[in-house]
Image (spheres, helix red, strand yellow):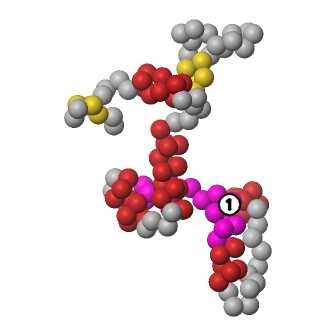
Amino acid sequence: MFHRDGKRIRYWRRRWLRALLAVGLASRETDDQGQPIKGGKIIPHAIVHDFRRGAIRALSRAGISETVAMQLRGHETAEVYRRYRIVTGDDLRDAASKLNAATEVGKVLGKVAALSESSERLSS
Protein backbone atom coordinates (compact mmCIF):
# COMPACT_ATOMS: atom_id res chain seq x y z
CA MET A 1 0.00 0.00 0.00
CA PHE A 2 2.60 2.57 1.08
CA HIS A 3 6.20 2.56 -0.09
CA ARG A 4 9.41 4.41 0.74
CA ASP A 5 12.32 4.22 -1.71
CA GLY A 6 10.65 1.25 -3.40
CA LYS A 7 10.34 -0.72 -0.15
CA ARG A 8 6.93 -1.52 1.30
CA ILE A 9 6.10 0.13 4.62
CA ARG A 10 4.54 -2.69 6.59
CA TYR A 11 3.45 -0.78 9.69
CA TRP A 12 2.01 2.44 8.30
CA ARG A 13 -1.04 2.91 10.52
CA ARG A 14 0.72 4.77 13.36
CA ARG A 15 2.37 7.15 10.88
CA TRP A 16 -0.95 7.65 9.12
CA LEU A 17 -2.72 8.54 12.39
CA ARG A 18 0.05 10.97 13.36
CA ALA A 19 -0.19 12.65 9.95
CA LEU A 20 -3.97 13.00 10.35
CA LEU A 21 -3.42 14.47 13.83
CA ALA A 22 -0.85 16.95 12.48
CA VAL A 23 -3.24 18.32 9.84
CA GLY A 24 -6.30 18.40 12.10
CA LEU A 25 -8.07 15.33 10.72
CA ALA A 26 -7.77 13.41 13.99
CA SER A 27 -7.84 14.16 17.69
CA ARG A 28 -6.43 12.65 20.86
CA GLU A 29 -8.54 10.78 23.34
CA THR A 30 -9.71 13.21 26.04
CA ASP A 31 -10.03 13.05 29.82
CA ASP A 32 -13.13 13.94 31.88
CA GLN A 33 -12.44 17.69 31.49
CA GLY A 34 -12.19 17.39 27.70
CA GLN A 35 -8.40 17.82 27.63
CA PRO A 36 -6.36 15.62 25.27
CA ILE A 37 -4.55 12.79 27.06
CA LYS A 38 -0.83 12.88 26.28
CA GLY A 39 -0.04 9.65 24.48
CA GLY A 40 -3.76 8.83 24.38
CA LYS A 41 -5.45 7.05 21.52
CA ILE A 42 -5.60 8.98 18.23
CA ILE A 43 -9.16 9.11 16.90
CA PRO A 44 -9.26 9.66 13.12
CA HIS A 45 -11.94 11.86 11.52
CA ALA A 46 -11.07 10.52 8.06
CA ILE A 47 -10.00 7.18 6.59
CA VAL A 48 -7.89 6.33 3.55
CA HIS A 49 -11.01 5.56 1.51
CA ASP A 50 -12.39 9.06 2.15
CA PHE A 51 -9.45 10.44 0.19
CA ARG A 52 -9.93 7.91 -2.60
CA ARG A 53 -13.59 8.90 -2.87
CA GLY A 54 -12.64 12.57 -2.83
CA ALA A 55 -10.13 12.10 -5.62
CA ILE A 56 -12.62 10.22 -7.81
CA ARG A 57 -15.30 12.82 -7.13
CA ALA A 58 -12.94 15.66 -8.07
CA LEU A 59 -11.92 13.93 -11.31
CA SER A 60 -15.54 13.26 -12.22
CA ARG A 61 -16.68 16.82 -11.45
CA ALA A 62 -13.79 18.14 -13.54
CA GLY A 63 -15.27 16.30 -16.52
CA ILE A 64 -12.44 13.78 -16.81
CA SER A 65 -13.65 10.58 -18.43
CA GLU A 66 -14.06 7.44 -16.38
CA THR A 67 -11.40 5.64 -18.42
CA VAL A 68 -8.78 8.34 -17.89
CA ALA A 69 -9.67 8.69 -14.19
CA MET A 70 -9.34 4.93 -13.74
CA GLN A 71 -5.85 4.99 -15.23
CA LEU A 72 -4.82 7.99 -13.12
CA ARG A 73 -6.00 6.32 -9.92
CA GLY A 74 -4.83 2.81 -10.83
CA HIS A 75 -8.27 1.18 -10.81
CA GLU A 76 -8.23 -1.99 -12.85
CA THR A 77 -11.98 -2.34 -13.30
CA ALA A 78 -14.89 0.04 -13.77
CA GLU A 79 -16.63 -1.68 -10.84
CA VAL A 80 -13.92 -0.50 -8.42
CA TYR A 81 -14.05 3.01 -9.89
CA ARG A 82 -17.83 3.17 -9.49
CA ARG A 83 -17.60 1.94 -5.90
CA TYR A 84 -15.69 5.13 -5.06
CA ARG A 85 -17.75 7.44 -7.30
CA ILE A 86 -20.44 8.39 -4.80
CA VAL A 87 -23.48 10.27 -6.17
CA THR A 88 -24.85 12.96 -3.84
CA GLY A 89 -28.00 15.05 -3.80
CA ASP A 90 -25.96 17.94 -5.21
CA ASP A 91 -24.96 15.75 -8.17
CA LEU A 92 -28.61 14.92 -8.84
CA ARG A 93 -29.65 18.59 -8.63
CA ASP A 94 -26.79 19.57 -10.96
CA ALA A 95 -27.88 16.94 -13.48
CA ALA A 96 -31.50 18.14 -13.34
CA SER A 97 -30.38 21.73 -13.79
CA LYS A 98 -28.20 20.83 -16.81
CA LEU A 99 -31.03 18.81 -18.33
CA ASN A 100 -33.41 21.72 -17.79
CA ALA A 101 -30.99 24.13 -19.51
CA ALA A 102 -30.50 21.73 -22.43
CA THR A 103 -34.17 21.16 -23.25
CA GLU A 104 -35.88 23.36 -25.84
CA VAL A 105 -39.01 23.79 -23.78
CA GLY A 106 -36.99 24.56 -20.66
CA LYS A 107 -38.87 22.18 -18.41
CA VAL A 108 -37.96 18.80 -17.04
CA LEU A 109 -40.77 16.26 -17.02
CA GLY A 110 -41.35 14.85 -13.57
CA LYS A 111 -39.95 15.90 -10.26
CA VAL A 112 -36.48 15.63 -8.73
CA ALA A 113 -36.97 14.19 -5.25
CA ALA A 114 -34.71 14.88 -2.31
CA LEU A 115 -32.01 12.25 -1.83
CA SER A 116 -33.67 10.92 1.35
CA GLU A 117 -36.99 10.49 -0.50
CA SER A 118 -35.25 8.64 -3.33
CA SER A 119 -33.55 6.30 -0.88
CA GLU A 120 -36.82 5.50 0.84
CA ARG A 121 -38.48 4.66 -2.48
CA LEU A 122 -35.63 2.39 -3.49
CA SER A 123 -35.67 0.49 -0.21
CA SER A 124 -39.43 -0.18 -0.26
- Which residue occupies the extreme left position in the image? 6
Residue 102 lies in what quarter of the image?
bottom right
Classify residue 59 as left or right of residue 103: left
Report the residue at 49% width, 43% height from top: 51
Examine the rendered structure and indicate whether residue 90 appears above or below residue 53.
Answer: below
Q: What's drawn in magenta, residue-wise? A: 79-96
Q: Which residue is mark 1?
A: 90
Residue 4, position in %: x, y? 27, 31
Q: Find out whether residue 2 is within the magenta segment.
A: no
Residue plotted at (70% across, 80% down): 100
Q: Hey, which residue is sitting farthest front in the picture?
A: 23
**10 Å crowding of disc 1: few (<14), some (14-19), many (20+):** few
Helix or strand or loop: what does disc 1 sit on? helix
Residue 106: quarter of image: bottom right
- The answer to whether residue 124 shows anywhere in this view is no
Quadrant of the frame with the N terminus: top left
Q: Label 1 is placed on what type of residue?
A: Asp
Quadrant placement of the C terminus:
bottom right
**Quick one: 48 or 18, which is closer to the camera?**
18
Question: Along the horizontal axis of the image, is 20 left or right of 123?
Answer: left
Point 77% across, 74% down: residue = 111
Instruction: List x then y, in percent, for residue 57.
Output: 53, 56
User: Which residue is drawn at the image coordinates 38% and 26% (left, top)?
Assistant: 12
Count the labels in the image.
Answer: 1
**Residue 41 at least partly seen:** yes
**Residue 74, percent across and down?**
34, 53
Pinpoint residue 17: horizontal percent, then vertical percent: 49, 25
Considering the whole magenta stretch, tell me its main secondary structure: helix
